[in-house]
Amino acid sequence: MTQLNILVVEDEDAIRDMLVMVLEQSGINVIDVPTAEAAQLSLADNAMPDLILLDWMLPGISGVELARRLKQDDLFKELPIILLTARGEEEDKVRGLEIGADDYMTKPFSPKELVARIKAVLRRSGKKLEDELLNVSDITLDIGKHRLTIAGKSLDVSPTEFKLMYFFMTHQDNVYSRTQLLDQVWGRSAYIEERTVDVHIRRLRKILKAYGKDELIQTVRGFGYRFSVID
Ligand code: CA
């Protein structure tokens, strides 16, 4: 596969260096800049990156403003953007996604989570990625082959359950409401009742239960669901 190019826009040196290191260790080519203005120059001067990791709070033009501008620009509107923020407020997340960011991550996050999110965003945007395996607690998702295995045994799951599992495995430890799961897994345009989510969660749990893994999908009362290896 061709090497991925990612533009990192982050004003804090320590975080920027960490991001560059993590991405380079994953075999990704990185250009890093400290401001939105420098990012605009880089985008004008260099080959189109495959994705931008964009810090929300930047001196000068903010990250969210740069994201908004890029998403309104015909040349850049298809360029995937992951917004990074130190704040975890739901309002920010909604605003970030409203202006067209493809995903949103709250600092601090683990390198593993970052790379998983990048791959998820790139896959959604239709980039070709190498056959890839996701592993969590003996559960393996083979993305290319659309196959779920637990402890080496291949299991029958519907495409929706596969997508749900994929979403959970790339978004561990966060709680998602039924509406959020519908948006993320079924797609924004789908008109599906919220209890459909419960039906698919129940099926997925049943499959996992045979291997003692059903507790990975946790019900958070009054809110929704969480996938976590931590109780
Ligand atoms: Ca910042």
Image: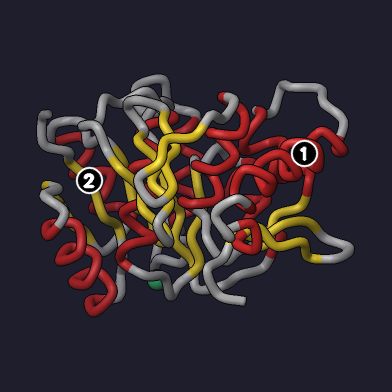
**Residue at 68% across, 51% down:** 94
Q: Residue at x 45, y 72 (%)?
A: 107
Q: Position of residue 123 (x, y in %)?
A: 37, 31
Q: Is residue 138 above or below residue 47?
A: below
Residue at 46% in and 54% down: 83
**Type of amino acid at the residue the image marks with label 2:** Ile
Residue 188 visible (yes or no): yes
Foreground residue among 9 and 173: 173
Q: CA distance from mark 1 to mark 2?
A: 34 Å
Say what secondary structure mark 1 lies in: helix
Residue 130 position in % (x across, y down):
21, 32
Looking at the rendered image, the quarter that the C terminus falls into is bottom right
State which quadrant residue 46 falls in. Answer: top left
Report the number of numbered marks.
2
Q: Which mark is residue 197?
A: 1
Q: Which residue is mark 2?
A: 6
- Nearest-to-viewer mark from 1 and 2: 1
* Marks 1 and 2, the one that precedes in the sequence: 2
